[in-house]
Image: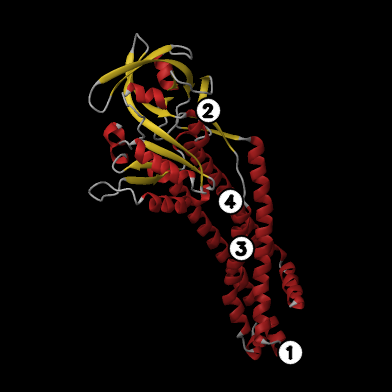
Amino acid sequence: MRNLFKIAIRNLIRYQRRTLLTASLITIGVVFVLVFVSVSGSFKAMITSQITDSMMGHLQIHRKGYVASIDNLPLNLNMSPKAYQKIRQALAADAQVEAFSPRLKFGGMFSNFTETTNIRLNGIDPEAEFRTVPLLPSRILEGRQTLGKGEILIPALLARGMKIKPGDPVVIVATNADGSVNGKQFIVSGILESATGPGGRDGYVHMDDAAEVLRMTEPQVSEVAIRLKDFGRLAAAVAHLEKTTAGEVTPQGQPLLEVHSWEDLSPFFNIARMIDVMTLFIRIMLIAIVLISIMNVMVMAVYERIREIGTIAAIGTPPGKIRTMFILEGFCMGVVGAGAGVGIGAAIVAVINLIGIRFNFGLQKGLLLKATLSLPDLLVVSIIVIVVAVLASLQPAVKASRMEPIDALRHV
């Protein structure tokens, strides 16, 4: 085998121009794939993190039918305190759950005593909420990164439109489940950067204040946001929680609760899927480039070396060794192209990070893209290139091994 490698390398060096052009084409394909996978994958991961870690959480649990009516923020589809306690106990005992936060969502009228508009609000336990969505404090543009009783965090669009600053008094008026109206004065503790997606323009108050505005003796829960220890196990966590909550049923025997991942709730998931589809097509293009390049080179190599093949066959070289020699030539070109592509691709990614790419996503400004190349991506692309290079060499190699020595030696 060692001698066959030497022969294969010698043959590649003998046709330097052709070998260099083919390896360069493979290298360019690998570079483009790696840079695209790195940038697009990092973009998807960053935006997913912005959505899940700043407002949504990885998973959410609702009472059945709540999500379908979420635009109206129905108070009659909240979980009772008793139902939430069961969920709380189950989540506290779940090893996959890092943190969870109950929310009481409601709509109301917002007034600065001179102007009035509508607002969506989340009643939260600040400590639990900041553990579940750790990027939420970073969205606070002005004011304190805390939330106490009697305080409110309001979205930046609302603050700019009504010229409100931290420390200003405001009033929230809301209608509770039985139709009566109640109001409460708050102090603005901070201004929130608005984000794209469900809940991206909501305000926040303390859970106890929300219950007071809605005249609840005990705070009810509209949804429970959940943060997982391992985001990669999202699908498994959804299935597990669905089994855990399956025992909660209505008096009619219907499921009481629903589990939704961020994928079910955010429109960005469709963009993420398109990124995955484009990545797949880019990899298919790489396969096509390698396949056509290697096959073309090997077919030409067989055609130009017919008399040489006849000579080595005539001196007793087995067909298997002839076949292996050509396959090794394709293998070597695949290895060289993949190795050079990985090196150049990693260098380009490093330059991209050095220069820094900033972009706006919805209302979020100046997000810095940090492109990364994971070891699995490098291995997958390299293996694809090498395997396809070997497969592309098979047909020419088989053709060479099946030549009759006499016919080959007569070839002009």
Q: Amino acid at mark 1?
A: Ile
314 or 62, which lies in front? 62
Q: Which residue is mark 3?
A: 383
Relative placement, left or right, of 179 versus 247 is left
Residue 55 at x, y = what percent? Answer: 46, 34
Q: Secondary structure at mark 2?
A: helix
Residue 186 at x, y = what percent? Answer: 41, 16
Residue at point 69% right, 56% down? 340
Q: Which residue is mark 4?
A: 32
Residue 321 at x, y = what percent? Answer: 68, 82
Which circle, 2 or 4, is nearer the viewer? 2
Could you tell me if residue 266 is visible in this image? no
Q: Which residue is mark 1?
A: 315
Q: Residue 137: which disc? A: 2
> Distance of mark 4 from mark 1, alpha carbons?
45 Å
Residue 138 at x, y = what percent? Answer: 54, 28
